[in-house]
Amino acid sequence: MSDCIFCKIVAGQLPSSKVYEDDELLVFHDIHPFARVHLLIIPKVHIVSLAECTPEHERLLGRIMLLAPRLAREHGLDSGFKTLVNTGRGGGQEVFHLHVHVFGGGDPAARV
Ligand code: AMP
Ligand code: ZN
């Protein structure tokens, strides 16, 4: 998707502070963190949102979810972390390329 900022990050056309990469996934720091640690896990392939996922994405989604606790641990979130997937305009999604927010180190009682 030529006008998708996360696809541009994947392609190296936009900078990001990358913390993890493999053949299918990319993880970088959110540019406007709402906690001490705030990471975004994205698939390299362009998927608009969770609502566009199909059974063929099952393994990819599983990999994303299993990566979250590993990266949280590596970033010192030993006592826990939050995950968030905004889906669609009504769900507060602003970047229409699937991403999972992983964050923590702020107020544990905060809703986001
Ligand atoms: P969402 O509301 O779930 O679509 O959130 C999109 C997130 O992407 C927001 O938290 C933004 O701060 C973050 N974001 C937007 N552009 C960039 C970028 N170029 N690099 C890192 N994070 C970004
Ligand atoms: Zn994209």
Image (cartoon, rainbow, N blue to C red):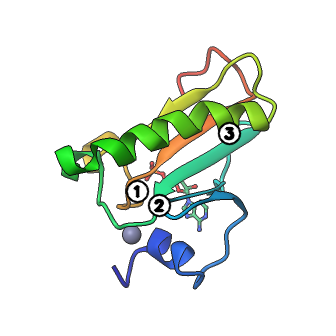
Depth check, front residue: 38 or 10: 10
Circle 3 residues within 10 Å: few <14, some 14–19, many ≥20: some
Task: Residue 1: name its quadrant.
Answer: bottom left
The structure residue drawn at horizontal position 77% and vertical position 37%, both measured from the top left corner, is 74
Task: Give the residue number, with chain letter if any, for mark 2.
Answer: 24
Task: Residue 95: name its quadrant.
Answer: bottom left
The mark lying in front, picked from 3 and 1, is 3
The dot on residue 71 is: 3
Whole-angstrom CA distance, mark 2 to mark 1, is 22 Å
Secondary element under disc 1, as helix, strand or loop, is loop
Relative placement, left or right, of 109 versus 83 is right
Amino acid carrying mark 2 in the image: Glu
Depth check, front residue: 38 or 73: 73
Amino acid carrying mark 3 in the image: Leu
Task: Give the residue number, with chain letter if any, for mark 1.
Answer: 94
The mark lying in front, picked from 2 and 1, is 2
N-term mark: 2 or 1: 2
On whether ligand 1 comes within 8 Å of the CB at mark 1, the answer is yes
The dot on residue 65 is: none
Q: Residue furthest right?
A: 76
N-term mark: 3 or 1: 3
Q: Residue 78 at what x, y percent from top left?
A: 77, 21
- Considering the image in quadrants, where does the C terminus appear? top right
Secondary element under disc 3, as helix, strand or loop, is helix
The structure residue drawn at horizontal position 48% and vertical position 68%, both measured from the top left corner, is 6
